[in-house]
Amino acid sequence: MDFHVGRAFGDYSITGLLGDEGMERVYKVEHRLTKRTEAMRLLAAEFATEIQIQRFEREMRVLARLNHPNIAVLHNALHAEKQLVIFTEFIDGQTLDSIMSAGRLPFDTGIGYISQILDALRYAHKHGVVHRDVTPANVMVTAAGEVKLTDFGLSKCFGDPLLSNCGEVLGSLPYLAPERLKGTTRPDTRSDLYSVGAILYEHLTGQKPFGANRRIAPVLTDSESEPQPPSELEPSLSPQWDEIIRRALARNPEHRYQSAEEFLNASAQLSQTPSARRLLRRERPLSAGIALVSALILALAALPVVKLFGPVAPVTAPLDRLHIVPPDFAASIAPPPLPMAKKLQPAKRHALSPPHSVETSNGAPNLATAEDADSDASQAAPQAKRSFWSKLNLFKKKATR
């Protein structure tokens, strides 16, 4: 049967071509009744090898037993005109490989993607499925940031017969665990965790742990050097990430994380710690700003103008210089007598006021009583008042003339 865009296939209409890998093609289709968009994968059985057909059928069975938000969902599978057909969830997004190739991801975004991968593997491992090809190319990311683990073509369930030939390397070399290259036949979940550790290393440092051109011989002979700690390549990272990478990429599976849940908990706990990633590129401008402000304050303090705002010196001038001298006309006015003085009786004033001496014209002292002093003051007060009012009535006098 000739499949092409615009043709109907059963209850589906082919709306687009998503990929073409020779014997396997992927189309975008729409169910005519439900209007749901799906992905249709075709394998030309008449041109495929027996092992390819068996792997394709195994992927059908594996996806049929998995139901997780981070794993592409299988909708249907069938044989049609010497074609093996799989209808899966259509994922509107791009691969993690293309996203990472475009540039460094924000720290939290990348950690979130890896956490979703580990969650998907935790579910798959619990159901007896080892993916065996966890790479950024097999991880789809939707526009909403949801991760979908795809391509279970190399997956293997516990107890399934081996389909690979002796010496055949299956998987992507930069993310392949050493035991897979050495010919370990038993499916091991820790091999998947090694691949996730390689993806995490690439996210943290922007580099693959063993370089872009990894060689098989050093892996087989155990002469491959350990990857450089992430904190040495990226100083803004906490050294605690070095320990996580060291365990995830350990050569011996016994020294790695023993489950996806253990790996997930370790990375999640560290990513939530404030000291997990010190953003030095943000701290340096802040320190420079503080230093600049401090320098400006010191420079302003040295200016003479700032001294005007210093503390006020204490007054050292004599108090008599600060006294305000009253005007002449106010000095000539005697204060009016107290109202209490009018009510006092003469006898009481004599008793209360002691005599005082008054010098006479011939120099002999003369004793005078307080009554005499009061009479003199009472005579001087009206005269002073008349003198004051006479000064104020100058204009009045001129007007009467």
Image: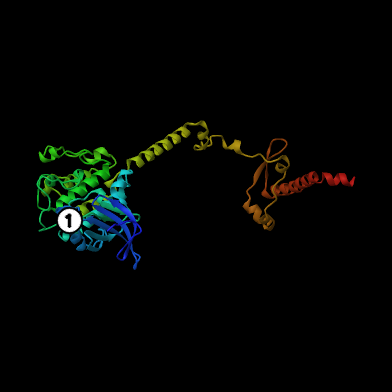
Q: Label 1: which residue?
A: 53
The answer to whether 288 is drawn above or below residue 132 in the figure is above
Between residue 108 and residue 190, name the one nearer to us: 190
Residue 119: x, y in percent? Answer: 23, 57
For residue 366, side relative to residue 138 (left or right): right
For residue 96, side relative to residue 131 (left or right): right
Between residue 16 and residue 315, name the one nearer to us: 16
The amino acid type, in three-letter code, at marker 1 is Ile
Residue 368: x, y in percent? Answer: 68, 45
Q: Quadrant of the N terminus?
A: bottom left
For residue 282, side relative to residue 125 (left or right): right
Crowd around label 1: few <14 · some 14–19 · many ≥20 (10 Å) = some
For residue 224, side relative to residue 312 (left or right): left
Q: Secondary structure at mark 1?
A: helix
The answer to whether 343 is drawn above or below residue 251 in the figure is below
Residue at image coords 82%, 44%: 394
Q: Quadrant of the C terminus?
A: top right
> Hey, which quadrant is residue 359 in on the image?
top right
Residue 141: x, y in percent? Answer: 30, 53
Between residue 60 and residue 255, name the one nearer to us: 60
> Hey, which quadrant is residue 159 in on the image?
bottom left
The answer to whether 6 is drawn above or below residue 361 in the figure is below
Residue 395: x, y in percent? Answer: 83, 45
| Colour convention of the picture | rainbow
> Hey, which quadrant is residue 209 in on the image?
top left
Using the rendered image of the protein, determine whether residue 272 is visible from the camera's viewpoint.
no
Q: Residue furthest front?
A: 1
Using the rendered image of the protein, determine whether residue 162 is visible from the camera's viewpoint.
yes
